[in-house]
Image: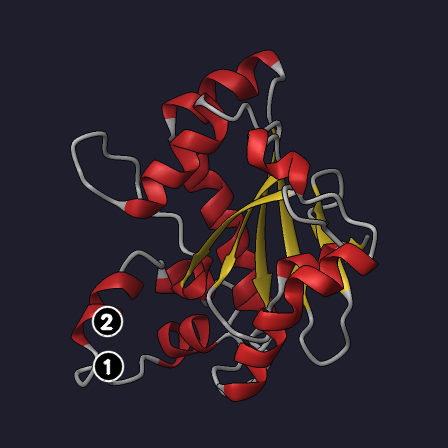
Amino acid sequence: MEPLIDRARAFPQRAGRSGRELDGLATGQSPQALFITCSDSRVVPALITGADPGDLFELRTAGNIVPPYRADSAAGETATIEYAVEVLGVRDVVVCGHSHCGAVGAVVRGDDLSVTPAVRSWLRNADRGVLLADGTDVFDPTVAGPVQRHVLAQLDQLRGYPGIARRLLDGRVRLHGWFYEVHTGLVLAHRADSGLFLPL
């Protein structure tokens, strides 16, 4: 923890030297995109995209899961997505899955999660049948195919959010499915015309 504390102490000087204008951030935010990705420590949205402070409105969840929309439920994920589109007017939403995803891997393998009941309950939001649609090797450590199908399923889930559904109809929002390879740094994007994930 000490290295993190040291870097946090030095951040004002580092930020000033890099030429970033932090003063402007005090007046509000206008992020370019809502970036939904996994809580995995190996996935760093600002590092992947080169984003500066204020560029990304981030939502990190175990397995980059987007829960079903329910206006009457106090879900931080739902509130974050709703705020991004309704209040901040974010025009682009990225769902970014990643290779070697522990959450998707656990669903694919049918791991015993009895020691983590909250995780087990959360992962019920992932459809194992969808993840295994192509007869995937459940012991493939990259879980690339299942993660990519999972990303598409989360995009479908987003289409059920009223604010996103309205904005998709009139072109005010665009959805993007990405897949990040943690071992290479390669980012693939889903192409609707081919149905494939291809390099950006």
Picture coordinates of residue 145, whole percent (x, y): 59, 67
96 over 94 or under it: above or below: below
Q: Return the residue nearer the eye: 133 or 163.
A: 163
65 over 81 or under it: above or below: below
Query: Could you tell me which residue is drawn at 63 percent across and 58 percent down?
Result: 45
Q: Secondary structure at mark 1?
A: loop
Instruction: Identify the residue at the far top of this view.
Output: 170
Picture coordinates of residue 168, whole percent (x, y): 55, 21
Residue 193 placement, left or right of 142? right
The figure's colour scheme reads secondary structure
Q: Which mark is residue 197?
A: none
* Contact flag, marks 2 and 1 (Cβ < 8 Å): yes
Q: Which mark is residue 120?
A: 2
Residue 157 placement, left or right of 197? left
Q: Secondary structure at mark 2?
A: helix
Query: Could you tell me which residue is drawn at 33 percent across and 40 percent down?
Result: 78
| Amino acid type assigned to the residue bearing label 1 in the image | Leu
| Mark found first going from the N terminus, 2 or 1 | 1
| Amino acid type assigned to the residue bearing label 2 in the image | Arg
**Residue 29 occupies quadrant:** top right
Residue 111 placement, left or right of 141? left
Query: Could you tell me which residue is drawn at 69 percent across and 47 percent down?
Result: 195
Q: Is residue 32 visible?
A: no
Distance from label 2 to label 1 (Cα)?
A: 6 Å
Picture coordinates of residue 12, whole percent (x, y): 66, 60
Q: Is residue 70 visible?
A: yes
Mark 1 Cα shell of 10 Å, populated few (<14), some (14-19), many (≥20): some
Residue annotated with mark 1: 113
Picture coordinates of residue 182, whole percent (x, y): 67, 75
Q: Return the residue nearer the eye: 168 or 149.
A: 168
Query: Could you tell me which residue is drawn at 18 percent across and 85 percent down?
Result: 115
Q: Return the residue nearer the eye: 7 or 119.
A: 7
